[in-house]
Image: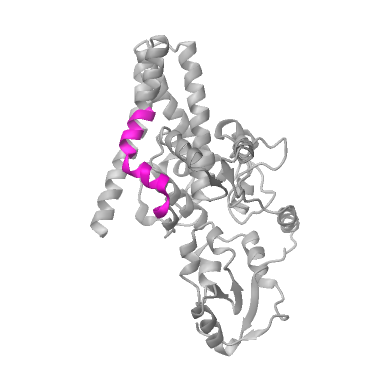
């Protein structure tokens, strides 16, 4: 099994390197060879870049990686098709590294660990692609997704068609610009697309950029200028604080085209179950961050008073979980996560692994949980495990 995973990682590494080398070289060779950029081709490149980029932000990112809304089959297939044309590999691959990033952000198990500098977060992690160094993430929800399975089955056919054949054919049959369609519609467009996505990994995690109005728990920052290049992924501090939210910008002056598209789709019945954090929770995070910046300690899970909760022995805790209750124990407090397990940003299996167990180390040490995650837990506390019963577990 390990050798198979190693072979798959090696194959993917060379595919990534091939893409990262050939796309800029194709564009450079075409330009140096005198291939003119016609107005029609330039407009096509712009449209394909914007539409394809939005398929990544609304599809790969907000739909599949964070499950922040549900899409109809028609919309899902369209997003998968257009997203594949951006050259960012499969939905499953994209979701895996992105969930690892959120779960282990700013640690050695984060694929694009911001502590390693701008170059690593922007492109270095791809050139040195090593999934064995990532922390474990749950992508089991994708195993039953027919769109993900369809994309994987026909991935290379879709990739060749959407990345190269389609833009070249449009330019050739549309205005007789075969070379321009290939050089600019495939090569240059993909290189622009790659860097637009990487900006979120690099600039939005750079210590010298943006602001942190919601949390300084991670390196993520709001960088308004990024909205121009990323389809609305500029409020990265908000996103890391509330990863399940389908929005990235809350106000009219915070450009988030992806949000408006999702809301438009919901009006026409193409999107549903849009997940949004309540204004109360958002304001609570903002106030907590302001207090922290003023050297005041915000309310956290560790400091909460749970004395009003009923007591429960460890044996009772285990018995209830064996009876079907979705209970976990964190620092002696029992939480009922039945209504949250399917919404867990890291995937339901990560909670499933700790039902009936002590998840203290997993919550505080293994994962980068935010103050918002703590507040979600507080709302689901049910009992206190007797200290003598829980000790050492």
The one of 366 and 93 positioned closer to us in this rendering: 93
Quadrant the N terminus occupies: bottom left
Q: Is residue 135 above or below residue 388?
A: above
Question: Which percent across, then down, holds residue 54?
Answer: 53, 34
Question: Which percent across, then down, holds residue 233?
Answer: 58, 40
State the image quarter where residue 302 is shown.
bottom right
Relative to 383, 96 lies left or right: left
- Asked if the magenta segment contains residue 158, the reply would be yes
- Asked if the magenta segment contains residue 338, the reply would be no
Which segment is the magenta one? 143-163
Q: Is residue 207 visible?
A: yes
Question: Which percent across, then down, holds residue 34?
Answer: 37, 10
Q: Is residue 183 visible?
A: no
Relative to 360, 12 lies left or right: left
The one of 387 and 384 positioned closer to us in this rendering: 384
Relative to 139, 293 lies left or right: right
């Amino acid at each position: 099994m390990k050798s198979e995973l190693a072979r798959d990682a090696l194959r993917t590494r060379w595919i990534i390197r091939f893409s990262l080398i050939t796309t800029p070289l194709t564009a450079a060779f075409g330009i140096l060879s005198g291939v003119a950029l016609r107005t029609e081709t330039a407009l096509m490149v712009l449209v394909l870049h914007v539409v394809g980029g939005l398929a990544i932000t609304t599809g790969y990112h907000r739909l599949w990686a964070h499950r922040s809304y549900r899409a109809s089959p028609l919309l899902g297939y369209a997003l998968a098709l257009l997203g594949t044309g951006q050259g960012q590999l499969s939905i499953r691959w994209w979701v895996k590294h992105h969930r690892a990033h959120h779960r282990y952000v700013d640690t050695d198990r984060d694929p694009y660990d911001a502590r390693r500098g701008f170059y690593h977060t922007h492109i270095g992690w791809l050139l040195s692609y090593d999934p064995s160094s990532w922390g474990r993430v749950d992508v089991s929800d994708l195993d039953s997704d027919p769109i993900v399975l369809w994309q994987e089955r026909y991935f290379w056919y879709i990739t060749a068609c959407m990345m190269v054949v389609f833009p070249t054919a449009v330019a050739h049959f549309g205005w007789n610009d075969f070379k321009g369609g290939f050089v600019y519609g495939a090569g240059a467009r993909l290189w622009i697309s790659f860097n637009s996505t990487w900006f979120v990994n690099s600039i939005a995690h750079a210590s010298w950029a943006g602001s942190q109005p919601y949390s300084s728990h991670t390196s993520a920052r709001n960088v308004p200028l990024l909205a121009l290049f990323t389809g609305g992924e500029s409020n990265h501090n908000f996103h890391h604080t509330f990863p399940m939210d389908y929005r990235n910008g809350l106000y009219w002056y915070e450009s988030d085209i992806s949000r408006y598209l999702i809301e438009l789709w919901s009006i026409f019945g193409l999107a549903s179950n849009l997940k949004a954090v309540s204004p109360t929770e958002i304001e609570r995070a903002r106030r907590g961050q302001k207090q922290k910046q003023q050297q005041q300690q915000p309310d956290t899970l560790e400091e909460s008073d749970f004395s009003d909760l009923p007591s429960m022995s460890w044996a009772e805790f285990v018995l209830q979980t064996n009876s079907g209750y979705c209970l976990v124990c964190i620092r002696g407090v029992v939480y009922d996560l039945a209504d949250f397990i399917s919404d867990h940003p890291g995937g339901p299996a990560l909670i499933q692994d700790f039902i009936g167990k002590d998840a203290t180390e997993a919550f505080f040490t293994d994962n980068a949980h935010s103050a918002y995650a703590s507040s979600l837990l507080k709302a689901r506390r049910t009992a206190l495990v007797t200290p003598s019963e829980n000790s050492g577990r």
